[in-house]
Amino acid sequence: MDFSWNDIYQDFLNSKIRKCSEREFQNSISSVFRFYLRWQNGIVAEECIPIGATNTIRPDFVLYKDEMPQVVIESKEPNHIQTDRNKEQLFSYMRQKKVDFGLYIGEMIQLYYDEPTDAELPLLMFTLEYDKENPYGTTFVSLFNFVDFDKNRLTDYCTNRIKEIQKEKQLEIDIQQLTSNEGVNLCSSLLKSHFISKRYSETDVEMILDDIEITLKRKNDNISTSSFVDITREFPTQIPVRNEFRTSKKRLKYSINGKGAYYKNGSALELVKVYLSDHPSTYNSIVSIFNGYIPNYVLSKEEVERKEGHSFDKNKTKRWHKDSPLVSSDGVTFYVTTQVGDNCPIDFKDIVSLSERLGYKIEPIS
């Protein structure tokens, strides 16, 4: 029988929910690799590795295939918060065993790759949360099931992943430049060329550009319009503003029990605020109520910061209402998601439905 990520993640997630000890979690990890991923006797626990004449180290697990070490695994309890020391320990084990691949398995799974020609520390390839829908889940099972495991195939994956990461970083740099004065200057230059091609004089073009405002912002900067180039006034020659220069869409606002005026993601935030005001609750209760109905609705400040530290998402700092932190009755600071609305992970209809279950009414303001 072939197992998928859907079969595996639940074992790890249950260990996290039960707050298992590190030893108990190691037993779960061993079972997953032995039986789900079919390593059987190919996974060796706490192998003693001599260091010098008198010292030894014991990595939590080493994966062997064809009698050769392939991957080192460093494990921590499932509710642990990773430290630099944890990573340093894994990297040390990798280099002592002379393997290029390491897995950190604790509160999440991380794959590290030590480029043979690179003197720097091993590189993070992906972070896999214990989430059924995580896209890296299928990748993890594909790369680390014993039958299909191949060092060269894993190397190729990591090499391609490094190219993707470098491309993502370059795109982020380009976007930052585009949303700076450099981008505004570029737009001005393009507009100038456009009007010159339409046989406007340079003096007329300068008058046009002096009479408009060009702004470049990321789409999810919580602004009221999604325009890239905002021409706020007509041209001096009374040429109508054309759609190719400006696109705007009216955004509805909503009230909660007849009070306030909020956009969709603001309504999601306000619902939690109102509920907490009426029903002071512990963080676990809040998670049970809101995440129990809509996954990833709220997340603790600590967990958000940890996820951001391991994420390659270029918009990761805008995924939560970090400017409006909330505090539970037991003192846990947490955030509400901003990912609500059209083309977002959370459908606004689900927010409205949850509000009704909680005794509140969200409705559009005419």
Image (cartoon, helix red, strand yellow):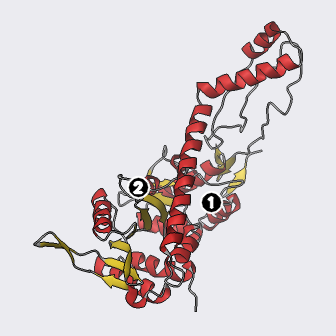
Identify the disc placed on residue 351: none
Image spot of residue 321 (x, y percent): 52, 48
Name the secondary structure under disc 1: loop
Name the secondary structure under disc 2: loop
Q: Residue at x 63, y 35 (%)?
A: 217
Q: Quadrant of residue 360?
A: bottom right
Q: Is residue 49 above or below residue 188?
A: below
Q: Residue at x 49, y 46 (%)?
A: 324
Give left or right: position of 147 versus 18: right
Q: Is residue 269 above or below residue 136?
A: above
Q: Is residue 202 above or below residue 108?
A: above
Between 260 and 15, which is closer to the camera in this rendering? 15
Q: Residues within 10 Å of mark 1 (few under 14, many from 20)?
A: some
Q: Amino acid at mark 1?
A: Tyr
Q: Please identify the quadrant where the C terminus is shown.
A: top right
> To which residue does mark 2 refer?
117
Q: How far, Cα to Cα, is label 2 from label 1?
A: 60 Å
Q: Is residue 3 above or below residue 90?
A: below
Residue 27 makes an appearance in the image? no
Image spot of residue 107 (x, y percent): 40, 68
Image spot of residue 130 (x, y percent): 49, 71
Q: Earlier in the sequence, mark 2 or mark 1?
A: 2
Q: Residue at x 34, y 73 (%)?
A: 75
Image spot of residue 101 (x, y percent): 41, 68
**Seen from this angle, which residue lies furthest left?**
54
**Seen from this angle, which residue lies furthest bottom?**
1
> To which residue does mark 1 refer?
360
Between 309 and 94, which is closer to the camera in this rendering? 94
Q: Please identify the quadrant where the N terminus is shown.
A: bottom right
